[in-house]
Amino acid sequence: MTLPIDPVDLARCVDCGLCLPHCPTFRATGRESASPRGRIAAMRRVQAGEPVDEAFVSYMQECVQCRGCEAACPSGVPFGRLMEQTRQALRSTRRPRPPLVRRTLEWLAYRVVLPRPGLLVALSWVLIPLRRLPGLTGRTAGLRYRAESLMERLQADDDPDVHLFTGCVMDAWQRDTHRAALRIMRASGAHPGLPGPGAGCCGALQLHAGMDFDARRLARAVMRSLPGDDPIVVCSAGCGAMLKSYGELLETDAAHRFAARVRSFAEWLEEHGGPPLRDTGRTVVVQDPCHLNHVQKVAGSVRRVLAPAYRLVDLDDDGLCCGAGGAYSLTQPELAAAMRDRTLAAIRRAGGDGAVVASANPGCAMHLAAAGVDVRHPAELLEAALGASPDAGDGDAGESEHR
Ligand code: SF4
Ligand code: SF4
């Protein structure tokens, strides 16, 4: 088996090891094989003709695809691309062939449910009573959406001058965040619209699983649902990174133009100018999602838009991944839990027990909320700090209802 990797990309790694401290799986295990350098060495061995064995597959699957290594690498190794291409090769050659149950669940999640947000909303109704069943409460602890939220559709303005991308998981399970984002956008003087028919999942989960064909199909559907030239605002760090990569993924002028319109929520707010806020006097611990920090490189925007309203505290976690990583907490539960434990300890050091944590990624928010953390999206925190405008609310970070 040959990996469809550009040898020039592989050759860029000079084995310096500067990426190792930035790799959460290396920090959790101490194993070279769980480090970026070790994974690149394994890829090189396969390129040189060594057979793909179970050890190689597990080294690749243990990577949470946080790209902390890419941001730290002085040689510019495009590790995210190397990992995506390796996973595409493993999936297309079906090596190893996963168990039938896993294949069925992946097919249902990636090909049936996520591309159809309406179906995900319908299934979410079913999950509401199941969340309280003994044995399921722990597994679904991060799902805190409200039934009322599922019933209320988001409202678009007439003649929009900006669009909010709603996606799949966030539209079903964190719709209140999108509601808060729309309110903030309006309070900032904008007229937000919503995606047209056919929009669904951005394709990030499929791409990370090696399903590049599905990812491209979903990307084209998202582009069709958001025509025009207006900015596209994305509240999910992972989806925003994906939409920004459509040019590279589809390699068309239209995709590059589309990608240039995409902004993370706080990034857009900073560029556009935000609404009047009151100083809440409250403390918020800021968690940097990897796809905002290492991939989009706009984590600073979150701090700048929250700063007028909150006293912000950073984590001393070296910017390491919290272990959410899309479906990673399901496929690698032990490593995901170890990474989360380190993040939880950093949250306690920063804000004590009961700290309010700002996170701009739904996966991180659910992963941390499942461990009892009070996580809010920056849009919700800003909504709670509206106060000097006629559109103001009166909630605050410690008291407003959360999802
Ligand atoms: S990936 Fe980059 S930082 Fe890591 S060992 Fe290779 S050259 Fe060094
Ligand atoms: S993407 Fe993250 S988990 Fe994977 S090798 Fe790089 S730093 Fe480690």
Image: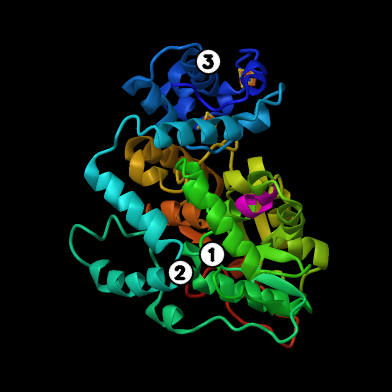
Residue 163 visible in the picture: yes
- The main secondary structure of the magenta stretch is helix
Q: Residue at left 53%, top 33%?
A: 85
Q: Which residues are magenta?
A: 241-247
- Mark 2 → mark 1, Cα distance in angstroms: 7 Å
Rendered position, 379 above or below 328: below
82 or 32: nearer the eye?
Answer: 82
Where residue 371 sits in the image (x, y, percent)?
38, 52
Query: Which numbered dot is residue 44?
Result: 3
Whether the residues at callouts 2 and 1 have beta carbons within 8 Å, the answer is: yes
**In the depicted structure, whether residue 157 falls above or below residue 296:** below
Neighbor class of circle 3 (other Cα within 10 Å; few <14, some 14-19, many 20+) is: some
Relative image position of residue 55 (x, y in whole percent): 35, 20
Amino acid at dot 1: Gly
Residue on which disc 1 sits = 167
Residue 160 location, x and y as percent?
A: 74, 80
Q: Secondary structure at mark 2?
A: helix
The residue wearing badge 2 is: 117
Q: Ligand 1 is located in which of the four quadrants? A: top right
- Mark 2 surroundings within 10 Å by alpha-carbon count, few (fewer than 14), some (14 through 19), many (20 or more): many
- The answer to whether residue 3 is left or right of residue 109 is right
> Quadrant of residue 382 in the image?
bottom right
Tag 1's secondary structure? loop
Classed neighbour count for the residue bearing mark 1: other residues with Cα under 10 Å, few (<14), some (14–19), many (≥20): many
